[in-house]
Structures are given as C-alpha cells and as structure tokens.
C-alpha cells in the first residue's frame, strides 16, 4: 500500500514538475532567478579540507545542508577533437556559460573560434538583470567566459591581446579579436561594452592598460558606455546608481583572507644525504606544523559576500523579471596552485558566506535556483598524519610539498601537493561536486555533464 | 500555487516517510533487503578514471544512473580521542558495520576494545539471511569488520593472532582474542562460527594455518559448525546446500582482472643529470604509455558478480524475511596502493557488474535498498597530459609515479601516484561518494557521516 502511495506521489510530482517547466518556459513574466556560485578548483578534497577546518570533522558546511548534491563530469575537447581528461578554468567556465564544450584556454568561444552566446547575455536580452562577481580579476578566465569572447584567456587587456610575453613565455595573443583589427577588443574592453549590469572583482590594471595603437584604455570607455566605475569600498558604499556598475578593488586578483603563518605554504620534507642515495636509508624531517593567520595584504578588501550583497541589491532595483548572477570564489584554485592551503581555506570560508547570502536572498525570492559547483578538480590531497606506514623502519614522506596544518582543536591535517615539479601545481581530472537549494530538487540529476549544468539553468530561466 | 502544492506534497511525503519508518520497525514480517556494495578506495578520482576508461568521457557508469548520490564524511578517532583525517579500511568498515567510529586497524571493536555488534549479526539475529562477499581474503579488514571482532586487522589466523612478524615488522597480534587465552579466536576462526549464511572470497591460507598451541585450523571447524566449504568454481557450481556456505577461491586475495601491459604500473619520470642538480635545467623523459590487458593470473577466478549471484541465490532459499548482503570490490584500493591503475580499473568493472546484479535482484524484490559507497579516498589523481605548463621551457613532471594509460579511443589518461616515497601509497582524506537505488530516495540525505550510512540501513531493516 505504501508503495502505491509512493507511486502516486511520484506521478503527482512528475505532473507538477512538468507544470513548473511549462510555467518556466511560458509565463516568462514570472520572476525567476539563478545564482551560480563557482568555487574554482573546489573539488571533494578541498570541500573536506574546508569542513574539517571550519566546522570540524563532525560538522556541516552550509553547502552540506543543501538538499541537492550531484557529481559533474568535466569535459574538454582536444585540438584534434580528441578527449582531454583535465580541463582549465577557461574552457570549463565557457561550458558552464554556454553549454558547449571547447578547447582549453578559450573564453566564450568554440573550437572553431566562433563566439558562443552566454547564459548571462541571453538572460540580459530576455530582460533579466545580470551580474558577475569574482575574487579574481574580472578579466580572468571564469568571470570573462560569461561576458566576453576571445580565442585565448590571456587576452585580458588592449596591449597583451596583440601578443608579446606572458608568464615569461612568448604569447601569440588574440590579434583577430583586437579592435585595431576590427575585433570586439580585449576582455576588459568587452566587459565595458557588455550587457552585464554589475561586474565586481579585481583587475583594475587591465582597465588602465592602453591600446598601443590608439592609446585608449578600457576605463576610458566608461562615460560613452554609461558605466559607473568604482575602485574602492568607500566609493562602492556611497555610490547609488541605476547605471551599469563595474567595481574593481585591486590591480590584479583580490588579496586572499588567510595565509600560513609568516606566509608559509606547503614545503618539501627535508631528507638526509643517505636518503638521497637510497630511499630506504637515512632519515627525513617533516616540515613544522603551520597555523593559518589573517593575510596582512587583505586589508579592507571587500569580502566576496559583501560584493554579492551589493550585486543583488543593484540587480533587484525595479526588477520584476528576475536575475542571473555568477559569483566566483577564485582563489581556492589559485592558492592551491601555489601550495598555500591556508589561502585556499580562507577562500572556502568566503564561498560559504556567499552561499549564506544567496540563501537569504532566496528566502525573500523563493523562485531562486542556487547552484554551487566547481569548474575542475585541483592538486591538493589530505594525506595521513603520520603516514600509514610510520612504523616501517624506512623514511616515508611525500615526494611533493606538504603542509601540516594546525587545526582549531590542535590536531594536524596534512595536505599534499605533488602533481608536478614546477612552481604551480596542476589541475586534476575528478568529477566535481554540485550543490543546489530546494528549487533544484528534481531539476538536477545525481550525475550530469558540465554542459548540462548550463542547460538546467537556461531551462529554468526559459532561455 | 505550485509552491503550495509542493509544500503539501512535502508534508504528505513526510507523513509517508514516517509511516514507512514505523512499517520498517514494526511490521518485521515484511520482506526487506539491503545490498551494501563497497568499492575499497573508490573515491571520485577512481570513479572518474572508471567512467573515462569504460564508457568514455561522455558516458555513464551504472552507478551514474542511480537516482541518489550523496557525499559521506569519513571519521576516525585517534589514540588520544583526537580527530584523525585519513582512515583505513578496518575502522571505516567497522563504522559502516556498526555505526560507531573507532581507531584505525580495529575490526568490529570500539576504542576500548569492546566488541561492537554488526548490522550483519543483528540482521541474522532478527531472522534475515546474511552474506559477505569480497574479492579480498574474507579475513581482510572490510569483510572481517562485518562478522568478527579483534583488536587489530592483522589477526587473520590462529598463528599471527599470537603476534610475530607481519610485513617485516614486529606485530603484537591480538593475544587477548586468541582461543588459547579464552578469546573468540582469529578472524578466520570467528568467520567459521559466525552467524553469517554465506561468505565468499579469497583467503584459504588463513583457514589452513594452524594454532601453534592446539594444531587446529579454522577449516577443521567446518563439520562441527555445519559449514559447507568450497574452494574452487567447479565445487561452487555443483554444491547445493542449505548449510552455511564458505567459499575460498584463492590462498590470499582474489587475483585482479586487468594489469598494465607486461605487468607495468605507474613509473617515475626519468630526469637528466642536469635536472637532478637543478629542477629548472636539463630534461625529462616521461614513461611510455601503457595499455591495460587481461591479467594472466586471473585465470578462472570467479567474478565478483558471479559470487554475488551465488550469494543471492543461496540467501533467497526459503527466505520470507529478506537479507543483508555486503559485497566488496577490494582491489580498487589494493591496486592503487601498488600504483597499478589498470588493476584498479578491472576491479571498477567488477563493481559495476555487481551493481547490475543487485539492480536485477531489486527488480524482482522491490523492497531492496542498494547502497554503493567507498570506505575512504585513495592516492590516484588524474593529471593533465601533457602538463598545463608544457610550454614553459623547464622540465615539468610529477614528483611521484605516473601511468599514461592508452584509452580505448587512443587518447591518453595520465594517473599520478605521489602520496609517499614508499612502495605502497597512502589513503587520502576526501569525503567519499555514495550512490543508492530508488528505494534510497528520501532515506539518504545529500551529506552524511559514515556512521549514518549504517543507521539508514539498520532503520530500513528495523534493526
């Protein structure tokens, strides 16, 4: 009997779900909103690091309280249309923004360099208010992929787009996209002319870099494009505008909130001379434990939660249609590349605060779909402290860099970074988690490909 | 309006869920079954490796089609009651089996060495048929924790339980558990006298090892305990018995199905002398790609799916109550420790087949809750092929071991093992995935601790 009732319920749910779909697609005057929160590199290792550190081994993060949790397969197309098993933030953000899989490094463009209309652009065209918030430079791959279209993620300003040197390596740029060649311009220029209502984050230097041909900067476009630009928290607080708003609160990426004591990150274990000759001999000295402390450079940087609140306030003005807002906690990834687990942890805390802000918004605006996900997996791994093999009479240690983090309860959590020998770690290829609020129940299956995350959001907004 | 209907539905669902709980607890004559499938070390990196390899980047594994996917926080208690962030298979299986968190290495015992009754034992006492199937020795930590109680996982037979040397290290054993000291005996002995109806896997050597005091082996207990023992697939196929059944198809763990070509696993990149002096100089030669091929040692080893079918057939005889069956694909972990990704992949395929067998059983027995989960995360990471930094003019390579696996479509998937310098990799600390069939919808939240997996199963069976 109970099974029959369950079946009946399933049928009723299905009918209602269909009715909701139809409502979403037809009754477009209903207010519906999507808040997409991307934790860059926020895979299951980092989620667990955050849980262990901030709420303890038995606690729950805000994301853990969300009713939907799915796994998302990340997909990348290789240059020969082959499959590539590890992605970057450009192609994954492009997939999330457009539903199309593409080459690594591409920003809002497909494998043939064709411009791909993004969900933010389509939402804007359909009358939704739109916003992009990031703790990176707003010209960085993830935010850029929602509002710009260039062949390569490095083309952030009117100078580098013409090519030159980037990260000490020759860089071809995206000359075909440069305004001097009749293109739409660099990412910074495209942001200034985009249809996005609010853009908040870092990256001022890309807006003050001039085109070597015309001498113009993206910032000079503000008046013509009717964009209000603010560059510090005081200006942000005092600015009431109905114009498009661009806020740039650092020259590059926003400083992160936490660091290892004295700026320490993961370090290589120190092995004795004998051990260097034979791994079974000699001894090893593990790095000293580190505590996480406030990063002095963070200063009065506006928090990601504050920027999210400002964006939501701005987008809610005279808005009966709804909104699309993408918020990225960018430096979980960036600090993981640099082997700074404390840096990543601070940005996980920032993401948690953003999710809380979004949930508060959804309380007042019940037709708000909140999705939290990562773009790709990242290098960090929690490894045993001490080794599982500590009793074996040979030195056992990580071949990479480790940080032994002193936890609030005094225990040690050891994080390993060992994907390469370079100064910046690799991304990894695991499927990534996705979380959603109650509005997402029934919309998001337990497993989906990254392009389908876009499709669910687009369908929900009737785009 | 739709929201109101949704709310109403939620209330109805809640009432029904409560009614179902009561039905589960009171109407114990209803047939209900639980099939718990554990992929040892089957974390998100391994799940993605399996998906990429067997069904392609855009495909779906059988587990991906299941409607429930959750994340499970693994928990371990340290010797000083502190938190430990990376577990082993003994304490995690004990938690899954009993709902109690404990020390690493413990099998069915708590932090004070007290015996913890397992869900299999309670199910048996309540009239359910029970079975344990594993591709490891049935005395290994995961299967043992469901049917035996010893202080330390190494106490697999009547000899080593008294202490001695294990893995070339002095081992204290579990003398307090030895029969000669009035204890319940080694894991092998406890299995022979356990209430479990079917036990299938490897580990014959532990049943033929004699107690140095009495000269007795666990196998000698068969007649007295009314246990039918089979030791090869032919015997298994021809044996029709209503007695308790113990099947042991290898001396130790069952051989795995796949290996790297010529037995190759992950290897260390070969760096030039100059690079050994300074990481920015010289060159590196990556290991050649490897293909996965059948493991000659696998021979006529019964598949895990076959063992699962045999167990289900045996447990279904004259069974109106239902059953509890735990099936472990053990060597995802064991092969990952040994840096053999092909070995792990073959065992992922075995797990997939077991899930299919379980789903077929559930089609005929709709009140069957199928849960698939991992006990802990593991070392392997999918890393970029080539490096994200391949264009940087310095050698970039993994500091650990890598395997560049030739995929069925000819592309390369590179897997990195770099948690330590030893011959066996470490476990890692990420939360692990959990999958369940439709019976689990509403029973399993999106996030839970490992002990709660036990609690959900126990509640479902009214235990």
Image (cartoon, coloured by chain):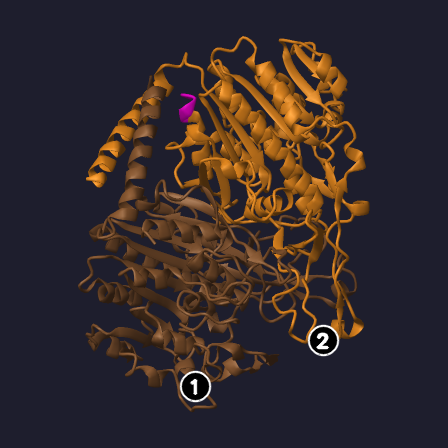
Chain colours: A brown, B orange
Residue A174 in the image: x percent, y percent? Answer: 53, 77
Left/right of residue A379 with respect to residue A61 in the rendered view? right
Distance from disc 2 to disc 1, alpha carbons, whole Å, reads: 36 Å
**Relative to residue B143, is residue A79 depicted above or below?**
below
Q: What SS does tag 2 mark?
A: loop
Residue A264 in the image: x percent, y percent? Answer: 51, 70
Q: Which residue is mark 2?
A: B278
Q: Nearer the viewer, residue B147 or B240?
A: B240
Residue A118 in the image: x percent, y percent? Answer: 40, 62
Quarter of the rendering containing residue B107: top right
Residue at 47%, 62% in the rendered image:
A94
Q: What SS does tag 1 mark?
A: loop
Q: Nearer the viewer, residue B328 or B302?
A: B302
Q: Which residues are magenta?
A: B459-463
The residue carrying pointer 2 sits among few (fewer than 14), some (14 to 19) or many (20 or more) residues within 10 Å by Cα, namely few
**Quarter the N terminus of chain A occupies:** top left
The residue carrying pointer 1 sits among few (fewer than 14), some (14 to 19) or many (20 or more) residues within 10 Å by Cα, namely some
Q: Nearer the viewer, residue A80 or B47?
A: A80
Residue at 32%, 51% in the rendered image:
A462
Residue under mark 1: which chain is it in? A
Camera sees residue B168: no
- Mark 2 or 1: the one toward you: 1
Quarter of the rendering containing residue B420: bottom right
Magenta stretch: dominant secondary structure: loop
Left/right of residue B4 with respect to residue B171 in the rendered view? left
Residue under mark 2: which chain is it in? B
Q: Which residue is mark 1?
A: A209
**Relative to residue B189, is residue A125 depicted above or below?**
below
Residue at 29%, 83% in the rendered image:
A224
Specify whether residue B308 is painted magenta. Answer: no
Q: Are marks 2 and 1 on the same chain?
A: no
């Amino acid at each position: 009997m109970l099974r029959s009732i369950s079946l009946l319920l399933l049928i009723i749910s299905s009918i209602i779900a269909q009715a909701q779909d139809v409502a979403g697609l037809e009754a477009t005057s209903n207010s519906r909103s999507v808040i997409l929160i991307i934790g860059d590199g926020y895979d299951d290792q980092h989620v667990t690091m955050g849980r262990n550190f901030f709420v303890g081994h038995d606690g729950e993060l805000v994301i853990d309280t969300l009713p939907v949790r799915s796994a998302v397969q990340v997909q990348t197309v290789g240059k020969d249309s082959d499959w590539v098993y590890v992605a970057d933030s450009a192609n994954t953000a492009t997939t999330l923004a457009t539903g199309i899989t593409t080459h690594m490094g591409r920003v809002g463009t497909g494998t043939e360099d064709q411009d791909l209309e993004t969900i933010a652009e389509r939402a804007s065209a359909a009358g939704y208010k739109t916003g992009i918030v990031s703790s990176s430079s707003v010209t960085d791959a993830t935010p850029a992929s929602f509002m710009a279209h260039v062949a390569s993620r490095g083309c952030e300003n009117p100078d580098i787009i013409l090519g030159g040197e980037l990260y000490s390596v020759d860089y071809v740029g995206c000359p075909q996209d440069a305004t001097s060649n009749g293109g739409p311009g660099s990412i910074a220029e495209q942001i200034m002319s985009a249809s996005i209502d609010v853009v908040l984050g870092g990256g001022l230097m890309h807006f003050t870099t001039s085109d070597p041909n015309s001498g113009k900067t993206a910032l000079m476009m503000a008046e013509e494009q009717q964009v209000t630009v603010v560059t510090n928290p005081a200006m942000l607080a005092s600015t009431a505008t109905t114009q498009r708003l661009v806020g740039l609160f650092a020259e590059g990426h926003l400083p992160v909130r936490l660091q290892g004591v004295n700026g320490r990150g993961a370090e290589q274990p120190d092995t004795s001379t004998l051990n260097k000759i034979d791994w079974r001999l000699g001894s090893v000295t593990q790095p000293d434990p580190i505590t996480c402390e406030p990063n002095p450079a963070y200063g009065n940087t506006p928090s990601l939660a504050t920027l999210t609140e400002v964006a939501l306030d701005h987008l809610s003005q005279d808005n009966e249609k709804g909104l699309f807002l993408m918020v990225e906690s960018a430096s979980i990834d960036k600090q993981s590349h640099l082997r700074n687990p404390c840096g990543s942890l601070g940005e996980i805390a920032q993401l948690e605060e953003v999710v809380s802000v979004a949930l508060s918004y959804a309380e007042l605006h019940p037709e708000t779909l909140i999705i939290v996900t990562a773009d790709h997996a990242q290098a960090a791994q929690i490894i045993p402290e001490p080794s599982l093999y500590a009793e074996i009479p040979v030195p056992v240690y990580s071949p990479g860099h480790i940080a032994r983090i002193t936890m609030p309860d005094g225990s040690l959590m050891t994080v390993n970074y060992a994907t390469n020998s370079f100064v910046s770690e690799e991304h990894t290829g695991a499927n990534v988690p996705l979380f959603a609020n109650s509005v997402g129940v029934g919309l998001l299956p337990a497993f989906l490909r990254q392009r389908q995350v876009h499709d669910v959001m687009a369908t929900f907004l009737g785009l």
